Image (spheres, grey):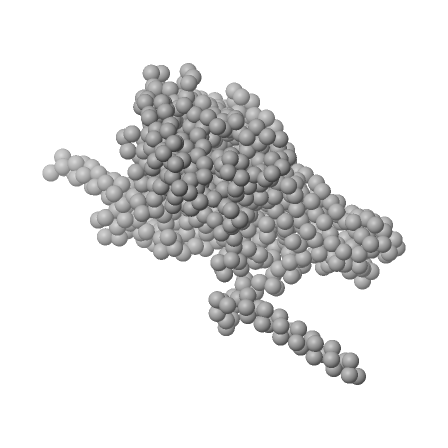
Amino acid sequence: MDENVKTAEREVTLERLREIDDDLRLPAVPEQVSYPIETLIPEARTQTPAVGQRASRPDGRLHGLGQTKYIDDLSFPGMIHAKIKRAGISKARVKNIDVSEAEKMPGVMATLVGSEIPVNSFGPSYQDQPVMVNGTVFHAGDPVAAVAATTEQLALDALDKIKIDYEPLEAVYDPIEAMKDNAPQVHEGESNIYSSKVIQKGDVEQGFEASHRIYENTFSTQMVEHVPMEPHASIADWDGNGRVTLHSSLGRITLGRADIARTLNMPINRIRVIATVVGGNFGGKNEITTEPILALLSKKTGRPVKGVYTREDEFMSSTTRHPFIMDYKTGMSKDGKILARKVRLVCDGGAYCSWSETTLGKACILSAGPYNIENLYVEAYAVYTNKTMTGAMRGFGAPQVCFAYESQMDDMAHDLGIDPLDIRRMNAFHEGSASPTGQVLESVVVRDSLEMAAERFGWQDWNK
Amino acid sequence: MKQKGKGIGCMWYPIGFTVAANPSAATVKVNEDGTATLLTGTVETGQGSLTVLGQIAAEELGISTDDVHVVSADTDTTPMDTGAIASRTTYVTGNAIKLAAEKAKEILFEVAAPMLNVKPSQLEAVDRKVQVKGFPQRNLPISEVALQAQFVQGRPPIGSASFNPPTVDMDPETGQGKPFSTYVYATQIAEVEVDDETGQVDVLYMSAAHDCGTAINPMLVEGQIQGGISMGVGFALQEEMLFDEKGVQINPNLTNYIMPTSLDMPEIDVDIVENFDPTGPFGAKGVGEPTAVPTAAAICNAIFDAVGVRVTSLPATAEKVLKLIKEKRANENKQLAPAE
């Protein structure tokens, strides 16, 4: 009997302890009187079947409480800070780099220049990108030297003491200019065009001949940044066994590790990449940036080295969305069927290829839109310019071409006196449609999405 | 005066890499109490992928999302993954996880079959139980089976698998081939208000209907769509990296590079188009990137509907829209002139 009472007491005490524990854990969250259904968190997370549940994210609570540990929140004993000197000039030959004044500064532990990188090139398609400038600057955001110091501010101050002599070289910024025969070459070679793609289906000329009307338009889009809330950040720790651990904001650790191994000329199994919860990627953290630099600075100093991009670093040196110039020529029947389409895409590929190859390929395939077009011809070019490099960004060329094909669609609908919704319904892919590459499409619901969005919007009854 | 307009943006988008191999591998371990641990090399980049992947493992094992702990993103401990790119995580990594969970489940079924006097093929995993198909009353808690497997029979229920989407090379001259395993489709319709005296464009409302195959987690699909629209609004109206004549960026900061804030966001209604892709895990495809694709097109078409001007170069800043409105008026006046 007595024993039972004791057990009950213990249970109560434990429960009370848990309550106190919960209170301690969640000091900042005010008690809410009622929750909408979707925030009944434990419900959805503990339900079976699991698929289809509005289960909350385990990291969401930590974000809300400010408890997520991003790279910049991590710290290791003896850790020092690295900063990168940017070229600030878009095309130049580096005549001399003098880091001696910077190295003399108290608190500065080490410097690093491009010639110290074992294999100074990487890239997902072509290895045309140096980790740090080695001889030639290709765009203004190129890293030229790095400093590791005991504080971030000291590292920043030391950057000003680095003296670099540049011999400016002729640059080109406009992709159309860069395609011309006499244009200055961004990289050594015969042409700035570094990738081209073609898609051909049916006979466009015949399609244009059969058309009631032909529409020609040129569209262009701008360069934009991913602007993740958390900038690129890494911490490198080179240990006594010659293994390096990198805590990084990389979104693709397998490829990242391979690139780090390549640039450091090390076996892959001596490199460990640990990613944290990344504070926004959107394609901008798909390749390495400063990881090899930080690793080498750690090797030089025997200390963990942290490197966090400033917002300016983020804009000037990380990848961006490709500006596109898009020529669309579309032939229409009188009743609004697309009979032929010819597309020419030029994408400003920036100083390095990065993911331009893939972006160009996807843009090419998607440029016809989700519409049945029997006669199609698409040609696309990626061109080097001496600008910030362009790379992977949410949509890989699709937002650009969608802007073009959908803008032209409405112009044509307007001209032919057809409702924009009807013209799309009429041309949309259906189950079993053949894509521009001849692929038979399955689970196609373009029309359903049109109907649903229009219904929700109230398209028919909408008044200005 | 403020003029209202409506505009459609419709799109298609592929899942995974263009032809190139983009495999994912995964390991699923069922613990002796019936909970599970999932190992994946993908990285949580804020989109909620780990939750979705946990749900896929849970579904296959007949347990709940909360019963699965996801370990991710460590090259020393987690299996290779092509990563959070190309809207491939739910589809490619998800398929690998489903296959891995299936293998762990096979061990559980082999252990449970003699306990229930049936063949492993007669079993299913539902509601944290291993039960006989058609006879749900003949069942064992998954915890009991897992414990039996690990500590009595010495067969820890662990499964590893990988997946790579099947594709066909594209012909270099005609581009004909099967570059992707599957595609998703979506429509966004925008309602805008254009001030024809300043060129200022406000996006008032956006209706978005997206296909993602089965929505493994509808709440996270909605989150992706809302986030994609905010990115699309910036792309359509505000964001632009500007360079001086020497190729140096002149606005590398958030003071002069204008991002949309919550105040720039329209009211959004999200609809998930019902669909099932037999090649995806439980019919799922993906949703990440497509959400940012049709937004700018929809907004620019709505501007055209509102004030009759066609923006051909993004972003549609107030200056650009006002200039187009003025040009249009000048043209209309010119056309009127001969009639006088």
Please name whichever residue, A24 or B290, is drawn nearer the observer in this view of the structure: A24
* Rendering coords of residue A164 (x, y %): 34, 28
Please name whichever residue, A76 or B325, is drawn nearer the observer in this view of the structure: A76
Viewed as shown, does residue A186 lie left or right of B322? Answer: right
Q: Quarter of the image containing the N terminus of chain A? A: bottom right
At x 26%, y 50%, the residue is B195
* Rendering coords of residue B314 (x, y %): 34, 39
* Rendering coords of residue B128 (x, y %): 73, 59
| Residue B133 can be seen in this image | no
| Residue A355 can be seen in this image | yes
* Rendering coords of residue B67 (x, y %): 67, 57
Viewed as shown, does residue B13 lie left or right of A212? Answer: right
Viewed as shown, does residue B249 lie left or right of A14? Answer: left
Q: In which quarter of the image is residue B323?
A: top left
Please name whichever residue, A306 or A187, is drawn nearer the observer in this view of the structure: A306
Outermost bottom residue: A1
At x 48%, y 32%, the residue is A355
At x 55%, y 33%, the residue is A260
Please name whichever residue, B136 or A45, is drawn nearer the observer in this view of the structure: A45
Q: In this figure, what is the number of numbered marks?
A: 0
At x 54%, y 68%, the residue is A24
Compared with B73, A364 (above or below) is: above
Viewed as shown, does residue A366 lie left or right of B43? Answer: left
Q: In which quarter of the image is residue B93?
A: top right
